[in-house]
Image: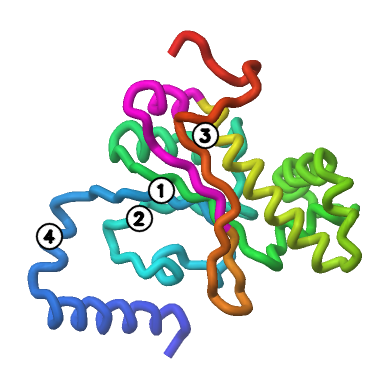
Amino acid sequence: MKPIDKLIENNRKWAADVVKDDPEFFSRLSNTQKPDFLWIGCSDSRVPADRITGTQPGEIFVHRNIANMVIHTDMNLLAVLEYAVDHLNVSHIIVCGHYGCGGVRAAMTRHNYDLINKWIRNIKDVYRMHRERIDYQTKPEERLNKLIELNVEEQVMNLAKTSIVQRAWKAKKSPEIHGWVYSLEDGLIKELCTMTHKDHLDPLYEFDDL
């Protein structure tokens, strides 16, 4: 059996098991989508949002890219964000990185990765802004993990800089934005930071006409 065929077989078995346990599951799921959470995570195959949070289909809206970035020219990310905030009315946005992230590791080098250079340059900017805090760490893996944490915190801040989030904060005092990092070694999530409508940015980033 080809590996791709195995996926189809697994799907059929999974669907049959779900119906056996809950005959109305799919009919109920197909009629509504009201997740409370938007997850912005890394594309790394070892960090599935639903598995590590114990959530079920319909409970968490997911966007993933290399190194869980929030880039203001990324129309894909912005469309997901607007839909989640304005139409699904999520109460929480989670930016979740993970220790040992290959995208962040690549950004710490001077190697040429062709097209990927354009993406990880944004991570290099985070490194440049926090170079002293990162280089203060004595071991390479500690420097990597510090940048991973700081990158998550910067992406939380980038979300707060969007008119989408600021408009929602003004209108309905939500959503809360959370910065997390996941450990591949023990499967645990570490909470790094949270931002709410009560927090303030540098005035340069705060819109005055929303």
**Residue segment shown in magenta:** 163-180
Task: Identify the residue under disc 2.
Answer: 60
Mark-to-mark CA distance, 3 and 2: 20 Å
The percent coordinates of residue 162 (x first, y second) are 53, 27
Q: Which of marks 2 and 4 is nearer the N terminus?
A: 4
Q: What element carries label 4?
A: helix
Q: Report the residue that reaches farthest toward the top.
A: 209
Res 115 visible: no
Mark-to-mark CA distance, 1 and 3: 16 Å
Q: What residue type is labelled 1?
A: Leu
**Around disc 4, counting alpha carbons within 10 Å, would you say few (fewer than 14), some (14 to 19), or many (20 or more)?**
few
Q: Earlier in the sequence, mark 3 or mark 2?
A: 2
Task: Identify the residue under disc 4.
Answer: 28
Q: Earlier in the sequence, mark 1 or mark 2?
A: 1
Q: Which amino acid does label 3 sit on?
A: Met
Q: Earlier in the sequence, mark 4 or mark 1?
A: 4
Quadrant housing residue 28: bottom left
Task: Identify the residue under disc 1.
Answer: 38
Q: Is mark 2 on a helix, strand or loop?
A: strand
* Whether label 1 touches label 2, CB < 8 Å: yes
**Around disc 1, counting alpha carbons within 10 Å, would you say few (fewer than 14), some (14 to 19), or many (20 or more)?**
many
Q: Check residue 184 in the rendering and tell me which mark sits there, or answer none.
A: none
Task: Identify the residue under disc 3.
Answer: 75
Q: What element carries label 1?
A: strand
Res 186 visible: yes
- Where 199 sits versus 63, above or below? above
- Determine the residue positioned at 50% across, 39% down: 76
Quadrant housing residue 118: top right
- Judged left or right of residue 77, residue 66 is right
